[in-house]
Image (spheres, coloured by chain):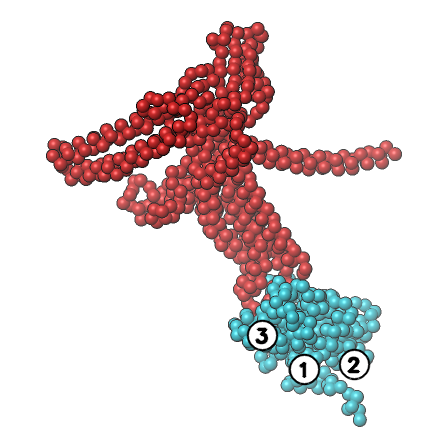
Amino acid sequence: MLKLFERDILSVDEISKAQTGIDVRDLCVHLNHKPVLNNINIRIPKNKITALIGQSGCGKTTLLNSFNRMNELNKNHACSGEVWIKDRNIYDRKEKVAKLRTQIGMVFQRPNPFPMSIYENVVFGLKIQGENNRRKLDDSVERALRNAALWEEVKDRLFDSALMLSGGQQQRLMIARALALEPEILLLDEPTSALDPLTTLYIEELINELKKQCTLVIVTHNMQQAARVSDYAAFMHKGELIEFSDSDSLFTMPAKQQTEDYITGRYG
Amino acid sequence: MLKKYLNHFKHSLAETSAMLCVSSLIIFLIAMVLFIGFKGGQYFVPQSIYKVVVSFNDGPASDEAFYQASSLSAEALQTQYLERYQGQFLSQPELRPGVSVTPAEQVYQINTRSGPVYFGEFYALSSPEQELHPLTELENLKQAVDLLERSLNEVQGNKLSDLHSRIAALNNSDVAKEAPARQDLMDEFSKWQLQASALKTQIQQFQMRFKEADGSLVSVPLIEIDELFQANQLTQIERIGFTLNKLWQFIADKPKQAATTGGVFPAIFGTVLMVLLMAVVVAPFGIIAAIYLHEYAPDNKITGLIRIGISNMAAVPSIVYGVFGLGFFVYVLGGSLDALFYSNTLPSPTFGTPGLLWASLTMGLLTLPVVIVSAEEGLKRVPEGLRAGSYALGATKYETVLKVVVPMASPGMLTGVILAIARAAGEVAPLILVGAVKFAPNLPIDAEFPFVHLERQFMHLGVFIYDGAFHNQTQTQSASLMFATCMLLLIIVFLLNISAIMFRHRLKTRYERH
């Protein structure tokens, strides 16, 4: 009887290896000669939405960036530890970073469409991969835009500049752009912080839909949003992972005092 | 109270002085453009002819009379002459001559092919038969001259040069002077030479006679006359026609009569070719350097030093580049090229002498910092978010630079190249050292194999102006040709700069949406 009410959310300790999307082991990251992440261990479950919360500067974005090695764009960075995705350590020396990033999509805080047409924006990643077959490109544009719930709005103006879209549309275009590569993991770095509440809701629904296809990790400052959309939540503070559990328990009965203080708004 | 007043005064003083500075700057700029435009424009407008009579006190026999073309009014010209003549008699006011200036309506202006300009009333046309023809016969006589000229060309071009080369062939094969074949040729040669000189004298005898202001007669051979018109009698339409003709001549013709009239086509051609060559060299170099500096170079002291070096390169006086170009490109590079590939023509140099190629390379070096700095400026304006977006989609650094960064920064790069072109189009000092000359007999591109002659010297607008300013100070006409060239250069540089500004603006609006 109880099972009817229970969502298929396991508690964090019960997640098996097969159900793990990203397995972070002893990850330490230094940026600009300062420690940003300190010994992070976290197993992010597959095909679920995991929210990273915490105050500004606590290392959420750095953690997110270490999943697709974007931290390496910073010239002064150092990291140790392992991040396992699909039975391989992405920090392995043999790992090809560009190839890795095609499997792990990322959406940024501010929409950053290239100054090209909508179509060109969506196929950018595919073209980089050497896909030039027009029909395949057309197909994946349609699929990606449908998945990002943007198809109906832009199907008549695919070759207009992407800069002409509104902020919410641009952000969905960014999601479509990432989805076009059919990634296993989608990283969202405060994807709705620059959008109005209604558009935010729209994107949240979209995110919920997407978990069928991929593992989602979302960084957000908005507690309600984290509680609304996420299945799991991780609270971070000053580079440490304080608490990680399913969202229901984290937001209703946090195990740590720090977490409670933060989500009830006592600091941060 | 006083303090408050003082404070207020200080503020208004600062504001007023700033306004004064800006407005005087703008006024100065506008005045400069207007002055150059006015002086240059005079070159295209027909000048009126005046008769100037200077009467001295020792009787009418000593009067001086002459015609003068001027764009001034009669009164203004009179004042000018009065000042000039009376200045010589400051201490003896009673000896001061009188000057009268009257428009000379019937007077013709005769521009000759060899240079001098005559003014005079028409007197008669004369042909070898010594008849006095009226002016209506002019066309007939011109046709006769044309006919004679054609037969002279026939004699000179075909007969004489043919004979000449045959004699030269005999000379080469050491045929004795008294050999009959040689004698025959020599006889024939002198025969045709006689005929040629007879034709020449015949042509010279077709003349036009003018009465000058003092009543004396001047004869000008018809063949010498380039243009003939009554400047004061031109109708409005004729004046416009004159101006258009002059404009066309200015753009499309060679400079004539020691660069006093004619056009500046070779200078335009040389300038354009030089800056194009320079752009071809400097654009890839500068842009690749900028991409390396901004995208790839590590952020350390050495990169900082390189940046400082580039800024300093922009501040090096241009003559230093000229000297470097002469010393390195012309003497070292050109000299070794000659030694390697053109040793059969040595000691006369091919590339080891100032020329178009070396001028372009020198200007390329001179404008390199401009291109690097603006290209880097363009790269800086590409938002980091776009780069991150590209990386996140699996692009490598090279692909990101090639597909996202460079297309977005291209207006900045283009701006740099345009500014470099504007700079090179207006530069003079280094060009004089490395290949620009005041008169080049041939264009650097012509029908002669290999069609593009990069080793040739060329003409350049800036150098042409410099030359005009220094070597033809006395003649008013050449001064206005110089001003007209100046105006042209100003227009070219303005247009280039405006297009650079427009590109920069487009770049800005492109990023504003981010």
Asked whether residue A161 appears in the rendered view, the answer is: yes
| Quadrant housing the N terminus of chain B | top right
Q: Is residue B424 above or below residue B228?
A: below
Please state which of residues B506 and B351 is positioned toward the viewer in this rendering.
Answer: B506
- Residue on which the image places disc 1: A212
Give the class, few, some or many, for how many residues have Cα within 10 Å of label 1's Cα (few <14, many ≥20).
few
Label 2's element? helix
Q: Which amino acid does label 2 sit on?
A: Ser
Q: What residue type is labelled 3?
A: Asp
Name the residue rendered at 38%, 42% in the picture: B456
Cα separation between marks 2 and 1? 23 Å
Name the residue rendered at 54%, 21% in the picture: B103
Q: Is residue B388 above or below residue A95?
A: above
Please state which of residues B283 and A33 is positioned toward the viewer in this rendering.
Answer: B283
Q: Chain A is drawn in which colour?
A: cyan
| Quadrant housing the C terminus of chain B | bottom right
Label 1's element? loop
Q: Chain B is drawn in which colour?
A: red
- Residue on which the image places disc 3: A138
Occupied quadrant, residue B184: top left
Whether label 2 touches label 3, CB < 8 Å: no
Chain of the residue displaying label 3: A
- Residue on which the image places disc 2: A249
Tell me how many marks there are. 3
> Furthest-right residue in view?
B1
Asked whether residue B68 appears in the rendered view, the answer is: no
Give the class, few, some or many, for how many residues have Cα within 10 Å of label 2's Cα (few <14, many ≥20).
some
Occupied quadrant, residue B137: top left
Q: Which of marks 1 and 3 is nearer the N terminus?
A: 3
x, y (%) of residue B474?
Answer: 48, 25
Cα separation between marks 1 and 3? 23 Å
Q: Is residue B413 left or right of residue B331?
A: right
